[in-house]
């Protein structure tokens, strides 16, 4: 029984030390978030058009650059990429990559849509605090 108490006390001490270390690490990471560059590719899978990756995750304050490539082989040859919460809206023609840039200045989960074809599968932008 004494051995069990000693082991549990040791685990609690290690856990407290780990939490204290985590707090110190978190405080050290309050610098400006790094710039984020992502390539999003519009593809067609079994007749469904979608942008990949479907989820883009960044930290609040990041300067975000997204290179957009439309690789959908079927018609129409243009597809939209929009993040309404950030006033991002671009039309991407097959074979003509585009780039969008914005600063992720608000935390949350924001839909990514095709503003030209609402039935297409959308995605999401996740901005962490």
Image (spheres, rainbow, N blue to C red):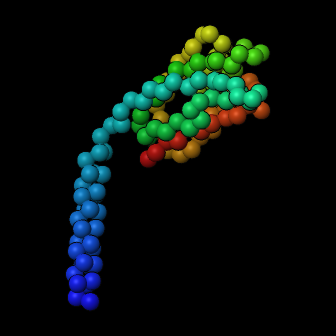
Q: Residue furthest top?
A: 95
82 up-or-down from 124: above or below? above
Residue 15: quadrant of the picture: bottom left
Q: What residue sits 24% from the left and 78% below the top?
A: 7
Query: In the image, 60: left or right of 4?
Result: right
Where residue 55 sits in the image (x, y, percent)?
56, 38
Q: How many marks can you see?
A: 0
29 up-or-down from 23: above or below? above
Q: What residue sits 44% from the left and 47% below the top?
A: 129
5 up-or-down from 23: above or below? below
Seen from the viewer's position, the closer of residues 101 and 69 is: 69
Residue 19: quadrant of the picture: bottom left
Q: What residue sits 75% from the left and 29% below the top?
A: 46
Where residue 17 sits in the image (x, y, percent)?
23, 65
Note whether residue 83 is visible: no
Where residue 3 sits in the image (x, y, percent)?
23, 84
Where residue 41 sits in the image (x, y, percent)?
59, 23
Query: In the image, 84: left or right of 32?
Result: right
Seen from the viewer's position, the closer of residues 102 and 113 is: 113
Note whether residue 33 is visible: yes
Quarter of the image with the N terminus in it: bottom left
Seen from the viewer's position, the closer of residues 46 and 18 is: 46
């Amino acid at each position: 029984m004494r051995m069990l108490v000693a082991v549990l006390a040791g685990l609690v001490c290690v856990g407290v030390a780990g939490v204290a270390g985590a707090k110190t690490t978190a405080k050290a990471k309050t610098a400006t978030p790094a710039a984020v560059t992502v390539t999003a590719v519009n593809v067609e899978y079994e007749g469904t058009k979608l942008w990949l990756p479907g989820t883009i995750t960044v930290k609040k304050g990041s300067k975000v650059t997204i290179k957009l490539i439309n690789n959908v082989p079927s018609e129409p040859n243009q597809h939209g990429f929009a993040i309404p919460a950030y006033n991002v809206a671009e039309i991407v023609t097959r074979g003509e990559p585009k780039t969008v840039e914005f600063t992720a200045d608000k935390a949350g989960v924001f839909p990514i849509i095709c503003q030209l074809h609402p039935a297409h599968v959308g995605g999401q932008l996740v901005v962490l605090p």
